[in-house]
Image: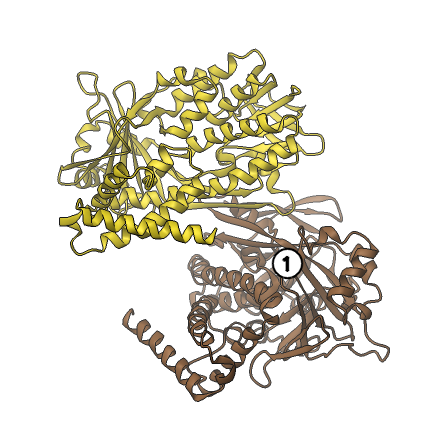
Chain colours: A brown, B yellow
Amino acid sequence: MKPQNIAIVGAGLVGSLWAVYLAKKGHKVSVFDRRSDIRKVKIIQGKSINLALSDRGWRGLINAGLEEDIRKVALPMNGRMMHYTSGDLTYQQYGKEGQAIYSVSRGLLNQTLVNCAARHENVEVFFNHQCKDIQLDTNTVQFFDTENNESKHLTFDRVFGTDGAFSAVRNRLQRLERYDYSQEYLNHGYKELEIPPGPDGKHQLDVTSLHIWPRGEFMMIGLPNVDGSITCTLFMAYEGKDAFENLKDEKTIRAFFEQHFPDAAPLMPELVEDFNNNPTGSLVMIKCNPWHYQDKICIMGDAAHAIVPFYGQGMNCGFEDCFVLFELMEKHGDDWATMFSEFTRLRKPNGDAILELALRNYIEMRDKTADPMFLLQKKIEARFNEKYPHLWTPLYSMVSFSHIPYKDALMKGDQQDAIMKKVMDRADIFEMWDSDEVENHILELVQNVNETLLSTQ
Amino acid sequence: MKPQNIAIVGAGLVGSLWAVYLAKKGHKVSVFDRRSDIRKVKIIQGKSINLALSDRGWRGLINAGLEEDIRKVALPMNGRMMHYTSGDLTYQQYGKEGQAIYSVSRGLLNQTLVNCAARHENVEVFFNHQCKDIQLDTNTVQFFDTENNESKHLTFDRVFGTDGAFSAVRNRLQRLERYDYSQEYLNHGYKELEIPPGPDGKHQLDVTSLHIWPRGEFMMIGLPNVDGSITCTLFMAYEGKDAFENLKDEKTIRAFFEQHFPDAAPLMPELVEDFNNNPTGSLVMIKCNPWHYQDKICIMGDAAHAIVPFYGQGMNCGFEDCFVLFELMEKHGDDWATMFSEFTRLRKPNGDAILELALRNYIEMRDKTADPMFLLQKKIEARFNEKYPHLWTPLYSMVSFSHIPYKDALMKGDQQDAIMKKVMDRADIFEMWDSDEVENHILELVQNVNETLLSTQ
């Protein structure tokens, strides 16, 4: 493969990982980021965004040789811990024994990945470089160096846009004839809050769980950090009854938390300060098509498919982009045009599918995890999966603990839902859920679906 | 009502009509357009885009007092004339006796409307003024005057964006936090062609019909002009078997037209020249939300809801925007904030509905109008509608000959489709279509739907 002069615009999670992949193939890689050097930022863990790393993300990291670096900053979470207003807790294991998703601080992970990229002598990282535009005919990127107040025009063989939901690289593509693009915001926003370490320096809630306070129309979640703190995020409507617009002052904030999160509120000494100082983040979904321009430009990660965070798959999908594009690079060698068009063809339907799954999971997390019928359904599915692993993998496991393409997971999940709807409609389900009869009922329904699929193929 | 200093950005069809409405209320209106004076352009009718004016458009025009001006340039079309490859023709009446949609040349109509606006002494029209940006705090519009090469900053009480699918005004709104926006292109494009007047100066095809050459995956349509010519438009995929990419030279163009449009091709002496000289137009759908910013900015027409042209409703929907916003102005007086937010609330769902209807109608026109089952279904619906007008208005009539909100038409159309699916599934439908039995079957199904609706209200 001919070494190329390559620009990566965006030194975030996906850009840094992709730099490692390209460096290993011997390309000359320049990574640009509009922010100042993220390695020099002091990360206060309880106050940083937390992400859940699952199997797709790990595969992307492991394949680049980075497993060891990342294990150090990742905490396994084996299940969901639901906190009810009554103070009761319910635990729901995510997958099989030993399967987990991993809590990581976005800031720490980003620093680690930039360091991993910069270790390669054929990688250079430039901060304070804002991408302003791209001349498509020559693949010349116009940067503004905000430190030295100067414009630079740099020409590359290939340009990768990994500059996130508000991507400047994609913005150039959007102006192409026949370019499909959409941005859609949820009516809900989010606010980050902190549960600091306890007096013993340890986590004040179970460290092996992702904590959820499901409240129907809104919810709070909590993910543990390696320093003993827990980062909490409240997701809620901007306007309406239980909504950000009504939490205006110390009194309304305290009253709201004491009413809805009575077990968490006492663990948040800086609740009101955090609430007032931290911005209310918005939640955007971005779709676009195609993800490339000729053999010149390719976008990956949030730049191509920004999704809501409720399946914990945004980063994982971006790392899977790297894995898939690297496979295509191995396959198509110097044929960058085919590599890029195959990337759009293969990945775009999966980006659309995880966007849909993530949106649906918001309802599941904030509402259904408080519903006994839903929890029973998950128990029945887990039981059936254990006895017939080749016939049934729960949707959550397909998404988080497998590499099944997202679009196939979405389709299979819908089939499973149709089956479970029939099973849960049984009048005797609460008494009979672990009976042979129910098991055989599911078996029969699965059989029907498989036969229908075979006959339509 | 307090007279306002108002800018309308875009002197197209909707902008010019809206200027007339505002002028009648005594506002000071400045209309800006990036193009040069469209009144000075010589319109070659056969070579201009044609539009179909239907009841919603007429209501918007009549309410502004412009009926007489527009009647002069409009030709009634009472039905569809389908041209099959065999040379056979089938005629399908659009509505009841006397109902028609009207063919108008976009260019002529635009000139007429600008003249109507400019007749008012409180309206001034500025051409060669490109909107570059808007400062939201002061409602200051930055124009670039392309004739004099100078920038101008002009401040207004209200700014209306009627600058079409690629609206600069909407572009400013898009950069607001939490603004929803999507642009989506069809894989099909269009090409305009001409059937000139015959040797006698008259139309070479029936002048009271909209002509369709339905060919499954593609189609051509033809609309008559007042000068005796007919403007034809070929709609077809960019890529694939029957696609623009394959019509590269005189030979392939001629062969394609002789194969698929054997009755039309001989009437097009400049077919190859037109095909090569006219651009292949793209078809974009644009959705956004909201359609306003505070009490300052409001977008209307294609700027708010660009749709595909297959229901002939793009302009009609824009003129209905004017009608509805004017009603809101009468109702809310000087409360512009309420007027604008009500406009978004009322009209946005209708914009979404006509977008969906227009998209579906492409399939109907290019494919179903060649299907005997579909034509029979329409005959049954028309017959039932005649006997029970209070129970059944065909979807086409709801859209084209009524003022039922588009979203209600879409919903009712879906209910009718579900009913007609059952009726058309009868094995005896070809023999029995005009029997009392089929009529009673439909009656019963309609009754069921109405009862279900009542019980859920």
The residue lying furthest to the right in this view is A199
Please indicate, yes or no, whether residue A296 appears anywhere in the rendered image: no
Q: Residues within 10 Å of mark 1 (few under 14, many from 20)?
A: many
**Residue drawn at 52 percent across, 54 percent down:** A287
**Image quadrant of residue B130?**
top right
Please indicate, yes or no, whether residue A274 appears anywhere in the rendered image: yes
Quarter of the rendering occupied by the C terminus of chain A: bottom left
Residue A119 lies, with reference to residue B407, above or below; the image says below
Decide if residue B205 is on the left or right side of residue A188: left
Which residue is at the front of the view, B450 or A31? B450
Residue B137 lies, with reference to residue A7, above or below; the image says above
**Residue drawn at 58 percent across, 38 percent down:** B171
Residue A17 lies, with reference to residue B363, above or below; the image says below
Say which amino acid is labelled 1.
Val
Give coordinates of residue A406: x percent, y percent: 48, 67
**Image quadrant of residue B30?**
top right
Q: Chain of mark 1?
A: A
Decide if residue A449 is on the left or right side of residue A265: left
Give coordinates of residue A168: x percent, y percent: 60, 49
Badge 1 is on which residue?
A31
**Residue drawn at 40 percent across, 53 percent down:** B452
Q: How many marks?
A: 1
**Residue drawn at 29 percent across, 44 percent down:** B364
Decide if residue B105 is on the left or right side of residue A49: left
Give coordinates of residue A208: x percent, y percent: 68, 80
Which residue is at the front of the view, A424 or A456? A424
Helix, strand or loop at mark 1: strand
